[in-house]
Amino acid sequence: MKTRIIIPARLKSTRFPNKLIKVFNGKTLIEHVCLRAKKLKYDSLIVATDSLKIKKIIDDIGVQTWFCTKKYSCGTERIASLCADLKFNKNDIVINIQGDEYNFPLSAVNKVIADLKISKKSIVSTVVCNTKDKKLIANKDSVKVVTDINDNALYFSRLPIPYNSNESYSLHLGIYGYKVSLLNIHDSLSNSKYEVSESLEQLKFIYNNIPVHCVKIKSHNSISINSINDLKLVTTSIK
């Protein structure tokens, strides 16, 4: 069982095109994410990209790239294709770190890896954190989640869920973990109208009765870059 850290990096993001090559603090966003990922323990670290610009940037910092111009519906589909192409073992653990998740929590990634190692079921493991921040809760780019008694996700939404909660809300971070064996069947899973309407790929797993286990953390300093305002927030925070 090996640990594969994979960062899907599509250049033409719908909401914020070319964000991964925006420069701040002397480096592009994708460089910041990759250099942070290099602090983890892994057997391979790979950036899966459709962009020669991103490939050159990543090659220059000594990180492996997997280049493919095929259009994929989501990052997980791109990663599944990579795993098949590179013939990874079905028991290998794959950690999907979103290329726009600046300053993602390293300890949370380690918790996801541990979660997958002890699970006897075929699951997706991901990260959530509670907040009472009204701006984050109202922001459609901040994905909310409700869970069951076992911390498995019931639903993810861009809207505040549950409705009219007087307590904190659980926000989702852009980190996923799965075994290669699950990725091998990803293309055969039924599509869900909910993943299309919400534009949230993880809903496909829930729709197909695959548990999405939510690893809870108390706090983090990660910022998901989905808009120019998010980028401004990052540049302000590092001054």
Image (cartoon, rainbow, N blue to C red):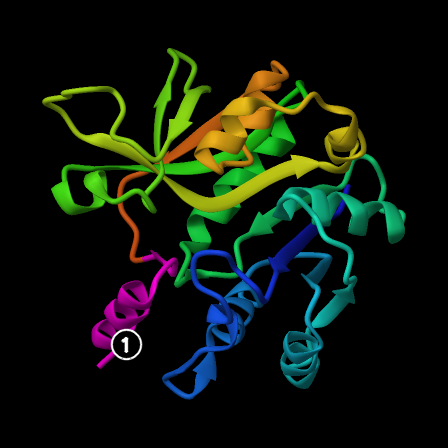
User: Residue 126: where, in percent of width, then height?
Assistant: 49, 36
- Residue at 56% x, 69% y is 34
Viewed as shown, does residue 52 lie left or right of 26? right
- Residue at 70% x, 52% y is 4
The magenta stretch spans residue 227 = yes
User: Hey, which residue is sitting farthest top in the picture?
Assistant: 149
Q: Is 168 placed above or below 99 here?
A: above
Residue 133 seen from this side: no
Viewed as shown, does residue 38 lie left or right of 187? left
Q: Secondary structure at mark 1?
A: helix
Question: Start and end of the magenta stretch?
Answer: 222-239
Q: Residues within 10 Å of mark 1 (few under 14, many from 20)?
A: few
User: Residue 6: where, in percent of width, then height?
Assistant: 66, 55
User: Residue 146: where, in percent of width, then height?
Assistant: 34, 22
- Quadrant for residue 206, please give it: top right
Q: Is 182 placed above or below 143 here?
A: above
The magenta stretch spans residue 49 = no
Q: Is 49 placed above or below 106 here?
A: below
* Residue assigned mark 1: 235
Amino acid of disc 1: Thr
User: Hey, which residue is sitting farthest left in the picture?
Assistant: 166
- Quadrant for residue 10, please give it: bottom right
- Quadrant for residue 148, please give it: top left
